[in-house]
Image (cartoon, rainbow, N blue to C red):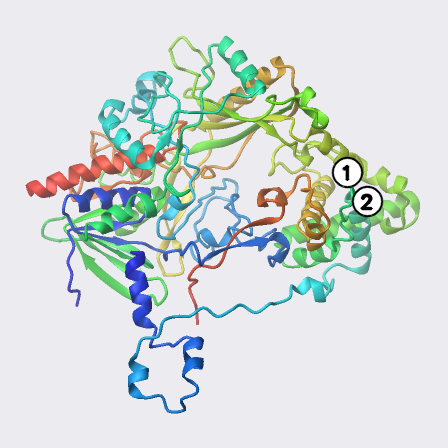
Amino acid sequence: MATKQHDVLIVGSGHSGGMAAKILTEKGISCLMLNAGPEADLARDRTMKSAHELPYRGFGQPGRLPHVFQANEYNANQWVDEKENPYTHPPEAPYNWVRVRLLGGRSLFWARQSFRLSDYEFKAADIDGTGDNWPISLADLAPFYSRVEQIFRVSGRKEGWPQFPDGDFTDSSFPPDSETIKRFTELATKRGIGVSKWRFAQGRDGLASSINLLLPDALATGKLDIVENAIVREITVDKNTGLANGAYFLDRHSGREMHVKARAVVLAAGCLETTRLLLNSGICNSSGVMGHYLVDQMYGVSVVASVPEARDGKAPENLMGGSAFMPRFRNLSKKDKRDFIKGYCLHISSGGDANPQFFPLYGEELQRKVDSYAGSCVSAGIFGERVARYENYVRINKDVKDAWGIPVLHIEARDSENETNLRRDAANTAEELFHEAGWEIICNTDQVNPPGYSIHEVGTCRMGDNPKTSVLNKWCQSHDMKNLVVVDGASFVTCGWQNPTMTILALSMRASDHLGEQMRQGSV
Amino acid sequence: MKRRKFVQNLLAAPAVAPLAAQTQQRPSAQPNAQARQTPQQPQEIASLAVTEVDLVAATQPHYFTADQFSALQKLAAVLVPPLKGKPGAVDAHAPEFLDFLISVSPAERQSLYRNGLESLNRMAQDQFHTNFHGLEAKQADAIIRPLLVARYWPQDMPEDPLKNFMAQIHEDLRTATANSREWAEGGSSSPSGGRVRRFNRGRGLYWRPIDPVVRG
């Protein structure tokens, strides 16, 4: 018999679950966190190795992680095993679902780019003339962004641009730009395109994760218990109240099934795992919208140029190096008529090498070319916004089950003409700017990775004011069950071009504040 | 939580005494009850030196036919020769390693390699009346160069099967060479391109399997 009862059950331990645990426990609310995987011991579980010491000489085990393009033989064990945890998609429409089940989830490995969404995203329908607005605005979320930025120690340069809202940065110092970055900035500025700097979560001790910035605070209250290797298969409902009252879960190793009770349930398993759990539980979907509007950002479009005077190792000091960041600059006003809606940002890096694949050469001839171009390259990559569309959706595939007998997700996501046109514009813009700078274009492709690759999947339990067209209210509570809150990226209405972590954290903080207050008042 | 886990580990120690603790108790043939009840601190045991297998043994090719493997060896010698004091693909035993790698790869990749190597031998016979391995440098170039294409995107492989094969095997040979022990010991300059570039000159932070599920 369980001897300990908890007020809130939290499923998932990444950024969103960690934030919920911190906020709720600091209000004196007891929480139980269930995490599907084990805790990693960063000292024990990692070691330095040479590629030739690995079984597959750095290639990785063939066919092991076909959907995780980020995987290599060094990091293969950090990702979810696709054989134990399969999912399905149409053969002609691949989807890269990239998952981590270690305690802390994907917060252990994120790129730490830290942006706020703007009202160009929160009120996207007003700008685009189509789609839906969020039920909240930047003003609603700004105070929470500020608190998150302080916890995560976000560095950045303030610009005062409405499409790129400034944060409460803990550090705004950057080294001087190299001559190539200055040249690029000058040319972009002439076109009315603002060029800024990356915004980055410094964290602490080289980590900006749930496990070092959020969960220790929650544990320090004495109000949090964490259970690892607990795979939740179903949220349970009180037949009398119609409210969530706990969950069934399985021990990852033995398969032993257990049940836990709670007054409220917070789902933070990641957008798609949360949606899978709700769909498998058969709850909170009176709107019929759950699983639809799956969206993430396009990563790709690679334009690379070589700076002639930097070749053959002859680059003068300060010519190469550094980076620049071009936040969204398209469709900021209705006068800007394009063959696509929404926008993209460009990441610019100076001082890289040329990829040998760019040259149809081999042997000594190839090596001479690669050596000559080494360090002379400037590259541009796109993070573009996809349109959230009803047709891109997930459902339960009852014919396929994971290693614990739980039905898996079937994912269908395809790009539209809007995405094609947007990425073409990105490639053309970068090429024009590099060409104007006098640099030799050595790569230009408007190709992008499959949907899901960005690991920024959001939107399958979208929030809204209308219970008939949305799953959650503006506080991330289920319209159907006020004591069930979704704090991960599933609540997003649009994905924006910005990395979503700061927004997920701010939404989780806001939703948890609200839930805590409602529990104090006794209304939940 | 770390503190909690540490305490749990300490409590678990007497149940499965570490080897060092057992060794210390050995002089007393009949350990007394008090000694058995005393929690033993986990102790570090010095690691023994072990030898990397490639230093003492060679990969035994078994997957490709003799004709296919000879074409692979020739291709390795031509595409990735020794340069700037660094070993080439043949010195790095890249063909032998790829024989193993392809043998455990998905069927599609296996077909790509087998058909590609067969095609090279066929083209060599048609044009120069010998197999690919027997070609002079100029003759090999006449076959290889038309099959090379610039690729701007990792997944953007040529539609033509033979050009696709050439792009794939070129990248694989470069990677197998640059990630080899021979390359690591052959100097300090980093190779140009290929997967090894991500790993800090061939070294990287490796994640061990973390609490894997053990199935019966």
Residue A238 in sight here: yes
Identify the chain of the residue marked 2, using the numbered disc in the image: B
Q: Is residue B93 above or below residue A415?
A: below
What residue sits 64% from the left and 32% below the top?
Answer: A353
Q: Is residue A185 above or below residue B46?
A: above
The percent coordinates of residue A186 (x first, y second) are 53, 12
The percent coordinates of residue B175 (x first, y second) are 67, 47
Identify the chain of the residue marked 1, using the numbered disc in the image: A
Badge 1 vs badge 2, beta-carbon distance below 8 Å = yes
Mark 2 is surrounded, within 10 Å at the Cα level, by few (under 14), some (14 to 19) or many (20 or more) other residues, namely: many
Residue picked out by circle 2 = B78
Horizontal side, residue A169 vs residue A189: left or right: left
Mark 1 and mark 2 on one chain: no
Q: Which mark is residue A120?
A: none
Residue picked out by circle 1 = A362
Residue A330 sits in quarter: top left
